[in-house]
Image (spheres, grey):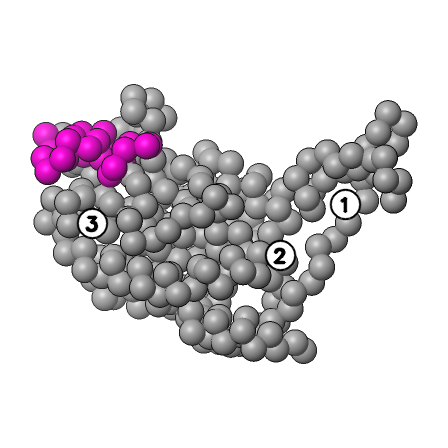
Amino acid sequence: MNSSLRTLGVPPNAWAVDAAIADITRPALSPNLITLPTATKTLRLDLAKTAILVIDMQNDFCHSDGWLAHIGVDITPARAPIGYLQALLPTLRSVQVPVVWLNWGNRPDLLNISAGTRHVYDPTGDGIGLGDPLPTNGAPVLIKDSWAAAVVDELEQKPEDIQVDKYRMSGFWDTPLDSILKNLGRTTLFFTGVNADQCVMVTLQDANFLGYDCILVKDCTATTSPDYCWLATLYNVNQCFGFVTDSSAMLSAIKGNRYW
């Protein structure tokens, strides 16, 4: 390639250009293949085409002073993924797998939130719902840049990580997530976070509908819903939308670097 050409765009979805030439070949990333066991099949996948989504591991869902705890939900299950993510994320970063923090962070004026969405979280209209201050610390529920919407302190976010705000249960609806993943050339997605049967599941379904390969990381995912919701989530992912694995299998596959 001509050394005078300059990169235009985000690799691998980038051109090389100067005044006379536009090289639109988009050189491929070097493959990094692993073999990963899942609940239904053994997968051969390319880490160079992979990203991990960490969904809603934030104070309102996972902290004792957050919103769910305030309305009487036992948040103990929502905290269960923290330790597993602490072990998994550094290894993924070390092999250049992007970590995408997908957080519920609404506009302060809630102009893009429908009445139906607000009703789910405040059915009488007189409770503590989206945008209302928490009694414990005054943080507005699920508002961008507030304590309530921040990732829990136990999970470290690195400068190279990617933050995406979402405004509904699905991380693909009305957000730049799909565009970001396409620019990065990522077609296989690991899913983690809470709640498994709600925000994680509908984001995974939308990813499947958009053509992504979807893998739910079981021990890095949890729900405060009844156990039958968790079982139904695992069944539906395995049956319809992708694969289910766990963090120990991922760590073993990456550290073993087992190629086919």
Left/right placement of residue 15 relative to residue 169 reads: right
Q: Going from the N terminus, do you reach mark 3 or mark 1 first?
A: 1
Q: Split into 4 quadrants, where in the image is the C terminus?
A: bottom right
Q: Is residue 198 visible?
A: no
Out of 221 and 124, give the one closest to the viewer: 221
What residue span does the magenta drawing correspond to? 126-148
Left/right placement of residue 24 relative to residue 142 reads: right
User: Distance of mark 3 from mark 2, alpha carbons?
Assistant: 33 Å
Task: Tell me where residue 49 appears, x and y as whole percent.
Answer: 62, 57
Q: Answer few, some or many: residues within 10 Å of disc 3's Cα (few below 14, many 20 plus, some between 14 and 19).
A: many
Task: Tell me where residue 9 appears, x and y as whole percent.
Answer: 69, 35
Q: Is residue 136 visible?
A: yes
The residue that label 2 is drawn on is 49
Residue positioned 37% across, 51% down in the render = 156
Circles 3 and 1 in contact, beta carbons < 8 Å = no
Residue positioned 31% across, 68% down in the render = 231
**Disc 3 residue type?**
His
User: Distance of mark 3 from mark 1, alpha carbons?
Assistant: 44 Å
The residue that label 3 is drawn on is 63
Task: Tell me where residue 151 appears, x and y as whole percent.
Answer: 32, 45
Task: Tell me where residue 132 appears, x and y as whole percent.
Answer: 18, 29
Secondary structure that dominates the magenta span: loop
Q: Going from the N terminus, do you reach mark 3 or mark 2 first?
A: 2
- Please state which of the two labelled residues, at mark 3 or mark 2, is closer to the viewer: 3
The kind of secondary structure element at disc 3 is loop
Q: Answer few, some or many: residues within 10 Å of disc 1's Cα (few below 14, many 20 plus, some between 14 and 19).
A: few
The residue that label 1 is drawn on is 26
Residue 248 image label: none
**Disc 2 residue type?**
Lys
